[in-house]
Image: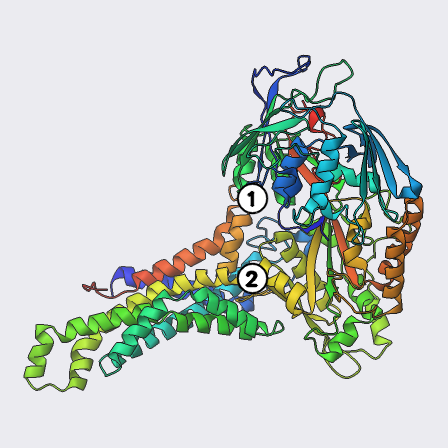
Amino acid sequence: MTRVRVAAVSVLVGVLTMAFASPAFVPHPYEEQYRDHAGEPPSRTFLLGTDDLGRDRLSRLAFATRLSVALACGAAALSVLLGLAAAALSLSILNKPLAVATTISLSLPWMFVFIILRGMLPLNTSAAVSIGLTFAVMGVAGWALPGRVFAASVEQYRASEWVMHARACGMSETRIWTAHLWPHIRSIAWAQFRALVPAYILAEAGLGLLGLGVAEPATSLGNLIAELQHTGSIETSPWVLAPLAVLAIITTSIELLRGRARVLA
Amino acid sequence: MKRVTITVAAIAVAALGALTTCALNGASAAAPAANHQLRFSIPGDPKSFDPLHALESNTELIRYLTGGVLIRVDRATDTAIPELAESWRLTEGGKAILFHLREGLHFSDGSPLTTADVARTLTAALDPKEGSPAGDTFRSAGTQPAIEIRSPRDLLIRYRAVKPALDRLFDQLAIAPKNRSARLPASAGPFFVAEYNPGSTIILRRNPWYWKRDSSGAHLPFFDSIHIDIQSNRDIQLARFERGESDLIGGLNPETFDRLARTRPGTAHDAGASLDSEFLWFNQASSASVPEWKRKWFSSALFRHAISSSIHREDLIRIVYKGHARAAAGPISTANKFWFNPKLKPLAYNAGALNALLATGFTLKGGALRDASGHAVEFSLITNSGNRERERMAALIQSDLNRIGVRVNIVTLDFGSLIERIAKTGAYEACLLGFANVDEDPVEEMNVWLSSGPHHAWSPQEKSPATPWEARIDQLELAQASEASRAQRKKLLDEMQEIVAAQEPIIYLVNPDYLYALSPRIHGARPGISPPQLLWNIEWLR
């Protein structure tokens, strides 16, 4: 493991530990409104200050980090797994239907699916269900691009000389998959996963417009970052940029976690 | 609610005083006292320069600045003052109005303006084929007024029945020239549209034929021209104002106000409470897809009171509006000095509000309020996404109600989806919204208060009044609509306000202040409470 990877792992583990363990040491519930302390700068009581409604920014950031990282990772993993399944199925007689489905999926305006989803969900749907469904639909909706990348890679590798050589030597298809194809595909899957996590974190914030995603009093990293556009004076209150810094640290760390450089990774 | 538009965007305005030396060929105009240009921005293109087709705020503003009207309502004092009409008289008990026009009136292209132009304008406005929004206010129960030209300067308009506030209606009717459908038609107001570059700028120039003079005899308006930038981005509008490239911005939000107060001291102004109001209501429509037990809560005045008095309005004002709002006391803003019923007081927070519910079978167990049949008291509250003030108010209300064991699920929706739910499908439980009232006279709000009205928010278009108090409101509204005397109408509307305050079908929260930015170089502004708040006396600005 390179020093860079060690550093990345350390930072990521540190941030996530802080986020997940924060309820034990952050004295303020994330939803509690301290109305006489609205919009305060960092202090000994509120280490990152308070938001416009007097809620502790640090507690909210920790909560948002827990929620966004866990669910975005889950959604990204779902997209990658579905993509891998599609790539595997593309080797069967389902190749052509899958190619058509991928093209359709890539060209669909998915926003309408979310609008329909909002229309179908009762307004009193619990926050947990709404959040879970939002990320689940994002995970399912995001299968096509990784699926196409995987399918193209599998096709390319299967036509390569070294796979043909393995096949000529009598190696079984299963063995070819596990010994030759998977190590290559795995790094592509990892790269796809790394790209999808921050994309899903930010995409969730946009879904708030449709009444989906994370609703008050809960919050997400995407929501906290979206609030920055309403912050009038970042120059005088730079601590409000903390959610952006956390997102940057997480995505950079995930990016630096990658293994040895590979051609397609 | 034709003249009541939902708050989504305010008219934005800003200004810079750039000296120009445009010498206008005023027929008999003396030199203006000052000859410079006013600059500000509006958020979008006007849809038309035809004064009879002003459908939205941008078009209405241009119509206001360019259109000549018979009577102007002074936005600062709420009195009707003569404009193109030198005098007028309400006759036949308020059914008719007799106008006497000023002598020597002209449009900006020099063509004379007579009662024939007034009659033609009103006839066109009333023509259903024209589809003019200006005509809506002049129609009365499907009947059209008779228009009688008595001389080039005298005109009688007669209705079959009493038309409330008949004289004030003419504040909204800009007298149109014959060529009103031209690309840049002439006008009879202080300015005319000289240039229009779609998506970019509108240049208004001083109307050399405008009749009004100041005390020294100088022709008004003082400004030679108005440069209007079309700019939807509020941040860019603000940056231009801060750079001195624009002279005014209207309808600031509290954050921007505070920022300007810091960066440009002396330019940010609070004109006090506006006519606008923010409120929430519960869906009581019989056709709504609301569970029966919830409908029972929502239709209970006791329940609505408990919710209303558990909300800290002072916190909404202090935290959401940074102090730039007033607690609302009812359907008419406290800023509306004539029509507001002074007996009404804003509902104060009442820590014991819950007790009234507990006395009627509700129970509080484990921090959750339940009704007599055991259902947890929980409802969804929809509001429009992107409106920071409303989103914050919703979060505060959610927290306030959580303290009495009521769970509120906030759902922010895009504006289109929200309107579809409240106006078409009825698929919602409670809604937090606001109205931007454009007229002080409540006559235009009849379609909110009549039980058969399409904007009867809590239960639209009832076939017959669902409750005795709604029936009484219907009676009062219809009575005031056929009453000519303002004092008598006020009496009727006072009772209506008292009923609304007692029943709270709409829970009024706050009346936000009108906040604006004005360059210290601009003088003569007398902000009013109805649009265009800052520019209503445009001819006197210098």
Where is residue B246 drawn, in percent x and y? 57, 30
Q: Dividing the image into 4 quarters, which one contains the C terminus of chain B?
A: top right
Sequence order check, earlier mark of 1 and 2: 2
Name which residue type carries label 1.
Answer: Gly
Q: Residue at x 38, y 75 (%)?
A: A78
Disc 2: CA contacts within 10 A as few (<14), some (14-19) or many (>=20): many
Q: Chain of mark 1?
A: A
Drawn side of residue A4 relative to residue B518, left or right: left
What secondary structure is found at the residue carrying circle 1?
loop
Judge depth for marks 1 and 2 and give the one in front.
Answer: 1
Q: Which corner quadrant of the image does residue B354 belong to?
A: bottom right
Q: Which residue is mark 1?
A: A232
For disc 2, the marked residue is A59
Density class for disc 1 (Cα within 10 Å; few <14, some 14-19, many ≥20) is some
How many numbered marks does the figure carry? 2
Return the residue nearer the eye: B37 or A24.
B37
Chain of the residue under the numbered disc 2 shown in the image: A
Is residue B351 shown above or below B20?
A: below
